[in-house]
Image (spheres, rainbow, N blue to C red):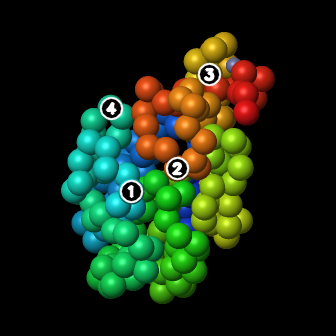
Amino acid sequence: MMISPKNTGWIEVICGPMFSGKTEELIRRLIRAQIAKQNVKIFKPAIDDRYSEDYIVSHNKRKIKSITIKKADEILKNCKDSDVIGIDEAQFFDLDLIGICKKLAKKGKRVVVAGLEKDFQAIPFGPMPQLLVDAEYVMKVSAICMKCGDPANFSQRISSEKNQVVIGEIDKYEPRCRNCFEI
Ligand code: ZN
C-alpha cells in the first residue's frame, strides 16, 4: 500500500485457497492495528466452529479475540466505536455482507476481509467475488500444491461430500495447483 486514505475508509480483501495463510495475514494486520491503539473488532460466522468459539485461530495456533455471529447485519450493531473491522471466513456470510462492508468503509472504517474466493469446485464463493470487485486493496495468497509442489490456488476436496459448505481441515481438503486440481 503506497498511500493510506485519510478522508475515507476502505476495504481490504485477503483471499486464496485453504492452507494459504489468509487468517494468519488477517491476524497480522489486526494485531498491528491493536498495537497502534486502534479499536479493532473481529467477526466470524457461527458456521465455523473449528478450534474455538471466541477467538480466530490460524493453523499455526496464533489467536485473536473475536465475535461469532450468525448474520452479517450483526456486524453493524457491534462496531460503532471501531476503527478497524476484521472479518474472517467471509465466504460463509450471506450476501448482505457486501453492502455492510461498503457502508462501513464509507463511514471511515478500515474493513479487512479474509476468505476463500472460490469453493471446492472453483466456483465464486458467497459474497467474496463482489467484495473483490469493490475492494481498494486485494491480496491473493497461495498455498503449495500437495501433489507437485507448485504454488496452489485451488482447494481440492478429498472427501466425497457434495455440499458447497463442508467444514474440514487437512482431513477433507488439500491445496492444489491448476494442473493438479480435479473437479
Ligand atoms: Zn500441482
Which amino acid type corresponds to the residue marked 4 in the rendered image? Answer: Asn
Where residue 54 appears, as percent x and y from the top left, is 22, 56
Q: Which mark is residue 86?
A: none
Q: Residue at x 47, y 68 (%)?
A: 111
168 vs 53, left or right, is right
Which amino acid type corresponds to the residue marked 3 in the rendered image? Answer: Cys
Q: What residue is disc 1 on?
A: 47
**In the image, is residue 160 above or below residue 75?**
above
Query: Ligand 1: which quarter?
Result: top right
In this view, the residue farthest toward the top is 148
Where residue 126 appears, as percent x and y from the top left, is 60, 61
Q: What residue is disc 3 on?
A: 145
Q: Residue at x 33, y 84 (%)?
A: 77
Q: Which mark is residue 60?
A: 4
Q: Which mark is residue 165?
A: 2
5 vs 63, left or right, is right
Question: Would you identify the image quadrant in which residue 177 lies?
Answer: top right
Label 2: few (<14), some or many (≥20) within 10 Å? few
Q: Looking at the image, is mark 2 or mark 1 earlier in the sequence?
A: 1
Under circle 2, the secondary element is: loop
The reply to whether residue 90 is visible in this rendering is yes
Q: Looking at the image, is mark 3 or mark 1 earlier in the sequence?
A: 1
Cα separation, mark 1 vs mark 4, equals 21 Å
Viewer-proximal residue, 83 or 61?
61
For the residue with label 3, is its CB less than 8 Å from the closest atom of ligand 1? yes
Label 1: few (<14), some or many (≥20) within 10 Å? some
